[in-house]
Image: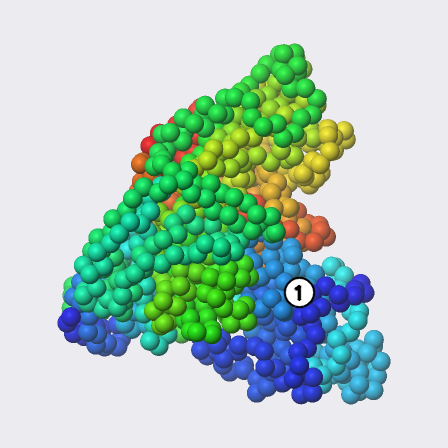
Amino acid sequence: MATYELKINGNTHSVDVDPSTPILWVLRDHLQLVGTKFGCGISQCGACTIHVEGNATRSCQIPVSAIGNKKITTIEGLSKNGDHPVQQAWLEHDVPQCGYCQAGQIMTAAALLDSNPNPTDEDIEATMSGNICRCGTYTRIKAAIKTAAKSGSLS
Amino acid sequence: MTLVRTTFGRRAFIKRVGLASGGLMIGFSWLAACKDATPEEVVMMPDEWFEMNGFLKIGDNGMVTIMSPNPEIGQNVKTSMPMIVAEELDADWDKVFVEQAPLNTELYTRQLAGGSQSIRQGWEGLRMAGATARHMLKEAAANLWQVPAAEITTAAGVLTHQASGNSAHYGEMASAAATLEVPEEVEMKDIKDFSIIGTSRKNVDGKKIVTGKPLFGLDTYKEGMLVAMLVHPPAFGMRFKSMDADSVKNMPGIKDVFTIDTYTDGTRKSFADIATFNKKVAIVGETTWQVMQAKKALAVTWEDSPDDSFEIDMFGRIMKTEYPSGKESSQSHALKMAEIGSKKGNVVRKDGNVDKAFKKAAKVLERSYSCPFLAHNTMEPMNFYANVTADHAELIGPIQTPEFMEQSVAARLGLTLEQVDIQMTRMGGGFGRRLYGHFLTEAAVISQTMQKPIKLVYTREDDMTFGNYRPSYYVTYKAGLDENNQLIAFQVRAGGIPESPLFANRFPAGAVENYQAEDFTIKSNVSVGAWRAPRSNFIAGAEQSFLDELAELAEKDPIDFRLELFDKAIKNPVGENNDYEAERYAGVLKLVREKSGWGKTREGVHRGVAAYYCHNSYVAQVLDIVNKNGVPKIENVCSAVDCGIVVNPDAAANMVEGGVVDGIGHAMYSSVTFKDGEPQQRNFDNYRLIRHGEAPRKQEVHFVKNDIDPTGLGEPPLPPVMGALANALYKANGKRYYHQPFMSNKPLLG
């Protein structure tokens, strides 16, 4: 066990855990930030996607010991009032069906638009292909990302 | 308006003891829902709620809470079912809170997610719940204003009496209305007067989903809760022998390691209790990661299991499922199906004489199709929270069959039904997997053993290797055309492991003079279960591919070829018990022909068409493929759907779009194969699910407009698209696809 000071969503959280614990389980089990989902545990489905220093990262594969001072953003911290352009576009297109994978989809999409504010269909497909949706909401996800890109309010 | 007696589901409308005087409601779990309330919701909260009936309560400020009785699995019933209540209540939808009802067999009927039946079976009761409350609000206003109730009108949560100029919102009348007698008869709206049903309303949980609020079973965290995981046999045909529990008991955070029997001899089991592996090892610890480490380290010895069987009570009929001993392989499965499928099966339906007709036929086409086992792969793995004490069981989690599981878990724990409380969380997908609630029972047994609250969590590997798969199927079609290219003989022989996918009375039964349907089954120890659109999820694609090839042989346009057959089924049906309405079937084909611009050719675009009927609804699809650098890319899918009245059109379109992607993905990429009884796919690294770049670029969904009471939608869009895909692929590259997954296009051989 070891103590870590984690910078998550603008706050500092102290946790005492085994160094090998993936950040996913630190978020869920220790900090009750359960918006980040467990899907596969081998970074194949993208349900656990968070931002580490702004980069979309699969939290199920990153041990807490590797985080250090890096800033983490989870779905709970993507925006203060749930009004990030991607979140708004998701609501406008009523994207979710079961909803379980959507936090991961949103985090990947938000990071994509951060680095590429006007993605083409091919850009979207390439980036989003790491996030599985069993309900099959891909068509709407693509439309929502385009809407968010057009909204022009991305920082 | 139509006057209807309030007999249907009346028990839900009769107020319970203790409520008669004040009307202040006590039966709802508002506090439970409150903790996740958004700031907007908190502001809108009334001081007092008044219960009108088991489905709704009205606040003194005019806010309305509508209970959604059925489990939410992503099919959007948590929005669409309350919309039906709100319609007949004449509520202002912007002032409606929706709350997931707990399991309550006293108040609600059929709290089950399955068979695309929630809206269809809930329709009348939900309407009546709203209409009854509206009637009581009008009575209350009539009493206060001293005017005839019949002169009072309602709209968007407001009561108005035009002549006297009186007006009040529902909240002002709720207290008085809640004390009134439930009427013997109520007026229900004419369909043409609907103002909420048929309009698109956003998912009531949308904001919570996109902001990561705890909604799912796996998100359950309670004070003092431990985490439990299971270790089950690595292969079908094996069982537990022994273990070295001490090897992990001292690992950090580990509390206990022991075996559990999910079911004990003599426990009554329903269909919802199907599970291959009965004895498993439970590991209980403080955190998920700690338990995962112990799970990897634990040394368990397994042994071959003998012939086994599992008896279930199928609605009063005892059905026995046999699990023969042995460790099976996909190779032997494929050989067995092909061998048995080449012989005459059990004749289920016979019209005319196919053998004679085939002899007379000018052209005969015979083709075989197959598909592998499939895992459900809900994105949220199986899990359940259980807190079982000597006289109570609190069970929280994702379950499609709470009513069945309440009965079986109560029997297993030695508790009464009254001592078992099941709360349904939003489900991170189901697709049939959560019809089988062994994980709920496992959680309860672990909690009872530990005498502590626990949350049972499956890893993805557990989830994928536990069974209750979509069965593997095989079908052979044979058809004969006469010299005028008329279909004169049709034979279908369908079987599978362990069940046949045959629907003997579905199209083209009824449209062919000489028709014969046969089935066969092969026993297996691999457990299976319902998977989105059971049986249809294979046979539709096979049948629609075969009809496409047959139309080509008959030198006819594939839509015209089908419409000719439907024409015959309409004008001169063959046989009885034909399980479809030919007019509605033809209707969706005509609609998709019109909307897709079928018949117009576009350079480089290859089109396939298919249509199917299941779960009381009709769906036709046209799928367009373009070849990009030699790789087929699905450009567009156009769906035409007849599911009766559409409650929430945009959400319904979403469901269709999802079914299309899901169907394409599984037909194209997915399979579970076995070697020595062991599933060869354990996680998403080698179990292929469709990914974003493989999904259609665009989709269009068109609904047939009619006044037929709503029918199913969760399942019907999936089956036909597999056929449309195969037919478009043929146009794109000249190859017919007979075996799923199409990516390999050969019978799976291990």
Residue B613's place in the image compared with B160, above or below, is above
Q: Is residue B599 left or right of residue B705?
A: left
- Would you name the residue on which mark 1 appears? B126
Quadrant location of the C terminus of chain A? bottom left
Q: Observer-nearest residue: B163 or B276?
A: B276
Residue B657's place in the image compared with B8, above or below, is above
Tell me which residue sits at (55%, 39%) in the image.
Answer: B536
Q: Is residue B476 left or right of residue B459?
A: right
Q: Is residue B674 left or right of residue B185?
A: left
Q: Quadrant of residue B591?
A: top right
Q: Observer-nearest residue: B20 or A145?
A: B20
Which residue type does callout 1 highlight? Leu
Q: Observer-nearest residue: B23 or B603?
A: B23
Tell me which residue sits at (62%, 57%) in the image.
Answer: B119
Give the secondary structure at mark 1. helix
Tell me which residue sits at (51%, 37%) in the image.
Answer: B499
Q: How many marks do you count on the picture?
A: 1
**Rendered location of residue B278, percent (x, y):** 39, 52
Residue B296 visible, this orientation: no
Q: Is residue B55 left or right of residue B282?
A: right
Tell me which residue sits at (59%, 86%) in the image.
Answer: B48
**Rendered location of residue B115, percent (x, y):** 57, 50
**Rendered location of residue B13, percent (x, y):** 69, 72
Q: Which chain is home to disc 1?
A: B
**Rendered location of residue B246, percent (x, y):** 20, 61
Q: How is the image coloured?
A: rainbow
Residue B487's place in the image compared with A31, above or below, is above
Residue B675 visible, this orientation: yes
Quadrant location of the N terminus of chain A? bottom left
- Pointer 1 local density, CA inside 10 Å: few below 14, some 14–19, many at least 20: many
